[in-house]
Image: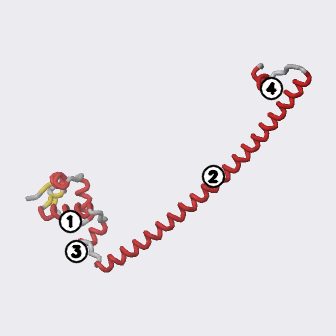
Amino acid sequence: MLLKTKQVSDELGVNPTTVQRWVKYFDLSCEKNELGHFLFSNETLEELKSIKNDLRRGYSMEKIKSAGKNNSKVAMVSPERFEQRLDRFSVRLEQLERQLDEKANEVITVQVLQHRSELEELVKKVSSLEEKLSELEDHTSIQEAVGQSTGKGKRPWIMSLFSF
């Protein structure tokens, strides 16, 4: 029984143009009708299902095509080689984690130093304000003393601010 492209695409759950593209890319053998439309056998349908599954697993079309030419699926890596790669990956991951920790510590150090500098600047400003306030208080007390000794009833300087 031969299936049309639309039937195959429905069976695979993909677009009909995707089916046509796979047939051309993977050089699948298909019959064509008098209008040049593909007709698929059950064997070709199974090949397309296999291709779809391989793509779902994350294999590239190029890798699937080359594996098909060799009449074997994707080559398996030996357990020893896999463990070597895993060990190298683990070592590299640890190095990256250390570097990340060092960089984070550097950033924190810079931020702490910057905050310290800002705090020192604020302390200087507060000290300066305290000095000016003290001077104003001294000046006010002198004026009050002068006003009391001359007998003039002067208002406190703060009251004069509100009289405007």
Q: Measured from the top left, where is residue 77 in percent x and y? A: 29, 76
Q: Which residue is mark 2?
A: 115
Camera-side mark, 3 or 1: 3
Reading the image, the residue beneath label 3 is 72
Q: Name the side, left or right, on which 50 lies relative to 137.
A: left
Callout 2 environment at 10 Å: few (<14), some (14 to 19), or many (20+)?
Answer: few
* Contact? badges 3 and 1 (CB < 8 Å): no
Label 4: element kind:
helix
Label 2 sits on a secondary structure element that is helix
Q: CA distance from mark 2 to mark 1?
A: 68 Å
**Marks 4 and 1, how far apart at CA:** 100 Å
104 or 141, nearer to the observer: 141
Of circles 2 and 3, the one toward us is 2
Q: Amino acid at mark 2?
A: His
Residue at mark 2 to residue at mark 3: CA–CA distance: 63 Å
Q: Which residue appears at 77% of the width and 23% of the height?
A: 159
Please, what is the three-letter code of the amino acid marked with disc 4?
A: Trp
Task: Choose the circle earlier in sequence order: 2 or 3.
Answer: 3
Question: Camera-side residue: 159 or 90?
Answer: 159
Please tell me which residue is depicted at 50% across the width and 64% down the height of the picture: 101
* Displayed quadrant of residue 80: bottom left
Tell me the kind of residue under disc 1. Answer: Leu
Ranked by sequence position, the earlier of labels 4 and 3 is 3
Label 3, secondary structure: give it. loop
Q: Amino acid at mark 3?
A: Ser
Camera-side mark, 4 or 2: 4
Between marks 3 and 1, how big is the CA–CA gap? Answer: 16 Å
Q: Earlier in the sequence, mark 4 or mark 1?
A: 1
| Relative vertical location of residue 7 with respect to residue 84 in this rendering, above or below | above
Residue at mark 4: 157
Helix or strand or loop: what does disc 1 sit on? loop
